Image (cartoon, rainbow, N blue to C red):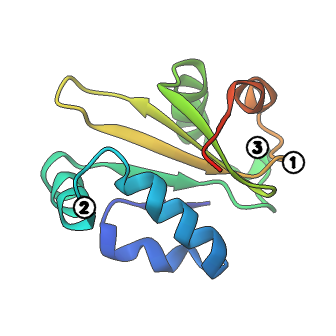
Amino acid sequence: MKFISNWQDLPSLLLPDSVMTVLRKELILPFDDELSAMNFWGEVGVTLMYIEPGDVPEDIKRHVLDVIHHLIANPEFVVYLTDEYYLMLSITEDNGNGIYLLFHPECPLKGIDTLMSMAESRL
């Protein structure tokens, strides 16, 4: 599992270029441009949690699992990015701050199947 709270750290997710392109496009969508998105992330403290393909619930700390389950129960939206990646956003504060959850279809967490059934395709 990886946590990103700085826009410049997105490459550390080590995603294929094709996926990173789609992810960046989705993260910029609510803004005028990438600089506006970067500034927003810096101002309000946006976080992206990436549940990697090999992650299993037993290896995730209990308090992190509690946060994830809260996010899953309160999605703002879910987007189908590619065959192997989905992106969900849960708004956590009145200032628009939120937590993105990036996950794959085989993610073993409870509630992921519900998120996938809600997913919109932006393709």
Label 1 belongs to which residue? 106
Sooner in the amino-acid sequence: mark 3 or mark 2: 2
| Distance (Cα) linking label 3 and label 2 | 36 Å
Q: Which mark is residue 13?
A: none
Which sits in the foreground, 85 or 53?
85
Q: How many marks?
A: 3
Q: Position of residue 100 (x, y in %)?
A: 47, 44
| Quarter of the figure with the N terminus | bottom right
The secondary element bearing badge 3 is classed as helix
Mark 1 or mark 3, earlier in chain:
3
Q: Please name the amino acid that badge 3 sits on.
A: Pro
- Looking at the image, residue 51 lies above or below residue 44: below
Residue tagged 3: 57
Q: CB of mark 1 within 8 Å of CB of mark 2?
A: no
Q: Mark on residue 33?
A: 2
Q: Helix, strand or loop at disc 1?
A: loop
**Number of residues whose C-alpha sits closer than 10 Å to that of mark 2, classed few (under 14), some (14–19) or many (20 or more):** few
Kind of residue at badge 1: Glu
Q: Residue 48: horizontal and vertical position, in percent?
A: 45, 53
Q: Note whether residue 15 is visible.
A: no
Q: Amino acid at mark 2?
A: Asp
Say few, some or many: other residues with alpha carbon within 10 Å of mark 3 (under 14 / 14 to 19 / 20 or more): few
The answer to which of marks 1 and 2 sits earlier in the sequence is 2
Q: Quadrant of residue 99?
A: top left
Would you place residue 121 above or below residue 84 in this image?
A: above
